[in-house]
Amino acid sequence: MSDITRMAAVAALLGDPARARILTALLDGRALTAKELAFAAHVSPQTTSGHLARLTDATLLACEKQGRHRYFRLASPLVGQMLESVMAVAGPEPPRTGSWRGGEALRTARTCYDHLAGRLGVALADSLHAAGHVTLAADGGEVTGSGLVFLRDFGAEPPPGKRVFCRPCLDWSERRPHIAGRVGAALATRCLELGWIARQRDSRAVTITAEGQSGFAERFGIRL
Amino acid sequence: MSDITRMAAVAALLGDPARARILTALLDGRALTAKELAFAAHVSPQTTSGHLARLTDATLLACEKQGRHRYFRLASPLVGQMLESVMAVAGPEPPRTGSWRGGEALRTARTCYDHLAGRLGVALADSLHAAGHVTLAADGGEVTGSGLVFLRDFGAEPPPGKRVFCRPCLDWSERRPHIAGRVGAALATRCLELGWIARQRDSRAVTITAEGQSGFAERFGIRL
DNA sequence: CGGACGCTACGGCCGCCGCCGAACCGTCCG
DNA sequence: CGGACGGTTCGGCGGCGGCCGTAGCGTCCG
């Protein structure tokens, strides 16, 4: 099988709505059981089982058995990056009369692996950029001296590590970059610590708490 | 249509081998006619026409009319990035007995937009990294002071511009990063200027000339 | 003007694949 | 042990969609 054929095969796996829902449900790195995924996919457990087998075969998913449960997760971060890049091309909902409900929470604020995305993530990036704390191009980012000071002061000093320090990540709903890398992760962690945001069950969406409303406004000038 | 459904729709477009061949044929940024794409896709012009209509509808392709020809090209760099990311997940040919011919030239050296990829691109990145001229993480890169000097000396001083300076780009055939961004583009341009490499007709593959063989060896310690 | 050419539109064939119901295995628990 | 539960396998149904042949439209050129 040629490279292109294999690429098409992988793309075809993403091309089915049920499988796409399964994959996006796992996008935040959690591991879910087959039944939970069946619910997320909106199809029966039998059908889901088949999909999971194919996704695992293609090594898009990894599977761990625990008792009578089987936990599935994305096989590698590459898979997540691929999903994000396809979403970026699929683009945001074309403007339509009337507002759209389903993913509103997700568009407002969500996790993208370990950092923040959605309107909140983008606003955070904008704020830091406007203050001269970071520079963000389409595909590369840097933290300035003042940015380092600011982060330390905020309690979000990025830990040393092998991962890239600061990297823009194209936000699929906003089509503008938010901050990923160690810096993005540290920011998200700190916001959770402060109780400014809270994770939602069974979703990548995060809610902004009352403390968060005021905190983001005071510290970053963000009002959503 | 929800975000996920739209993502699945886009992925389904990539999921057909004929369309995948069309898209990858356009991956280097050239604009090709419908007939040329029919040849690349290995299907009849009628069938190709339908595929092209769908791809254009989904704004994966852009189309320009010129006389009785219609030229198609990728609608945006995002589309190319998406293709590369899917290829990265699809991964290289699983090791198989006997060597594989079809894409050998492509694996050795090719263009990825405006910079070099394949074994040559990766070797170049390795060489610059080993010499301490650049640092490359999985998703961010930097040029060191000595690197700037080296590039200027080599005649590949990156022009100022809005694009990101130096960025790793995951090589789908090697599964390791090569250098993109203004630095990657300048390197590729300079190598062409020097006559070290030559573009091939109708392919993203580039051939390494005799001058290139010795040049890459002397200057970068690369032998392919 | 007439023919060649690039491309598109329509219709029909056919295979693939997603879906579910029913039945079957393995694990947990009372 | 028996029942509940998670998960998988199998078989059959139905529809979507890729493919091509034919035919039609616009453009170029002698």
Image (cartoon, coloured by chain):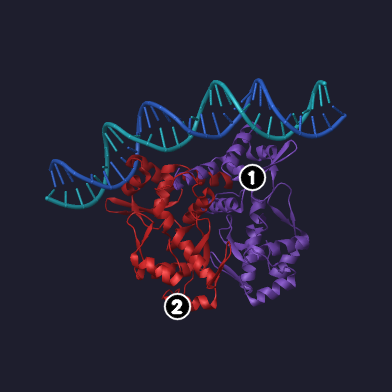
Chain colours: A red, B purple, C cyan, D blue
The local crowd at label 1, few if under 14, some if 14 to 19, many if 20 or more residues have their Cα within 10 Å, is some
Q: Which x, y percent locates residue B88?
A: 54, 54
Q: Which x, y percent locates residue A173?
A: 48, 54
Residue sitting at x 60%, y 34%: B50
Q: Which x, y percent locates residue D12?
A: 36, 26
Identify which residue, A188 or B104, lies in the foreground. A188
Q: CA distance from mark 2 to mark 1?
A: 46 Å
Q: Which residue is mark 2?
A: A152
What is the number of the mark on residue B62?
Answer: 1
Identify which residue, B107 or D21, lies in the foreground. D21
What is the number of the mark on residue B214?
Answer: none
Secondary structure state at the residue bearing disc 1: strand
Chain of the residue that carries numbered disc 1 in the rendered image: B
Q: Which quarter shows the C terminus of chain B?
A: bottom right
Displayed quadrant of residue A219: bottom left
Displayed quadrant of residue D29: top right
Residue A26 in sight: no
Give the side of residue A200 with respect to residue A108, left or right.
left
Residue B175 in sight: yes
Identify which residue, A153 or B153, lies in the foreground. A153
Residue sitting at x 52%, y 72%: A131
Q: Which quarter shows the N terminus of chain B?
A: top left
- The relative height of residue A127 versus residue D18 in the rendered view (above or below) is below
Q: Are marks 2 and 1 in contact (CB under 8 Å)?
A: no
Q: Which x, y percent locates residue A73?
A: 39, 54
- The relative height of residue A142 versus residue B72 in the rendered view (above or below) is below
Identity, as a three-letter code, of the amino acid under mark 1 = Ala
Residue sitting at x 60%, y 41%: B56
Identity, as a three-letter code, of the amino acid under mark 2 = Arg
Chain of the residue that carries numbered disc 2 in the rendered image: A
Give the side of residue C11 with respect to residue B156, left or right.
left
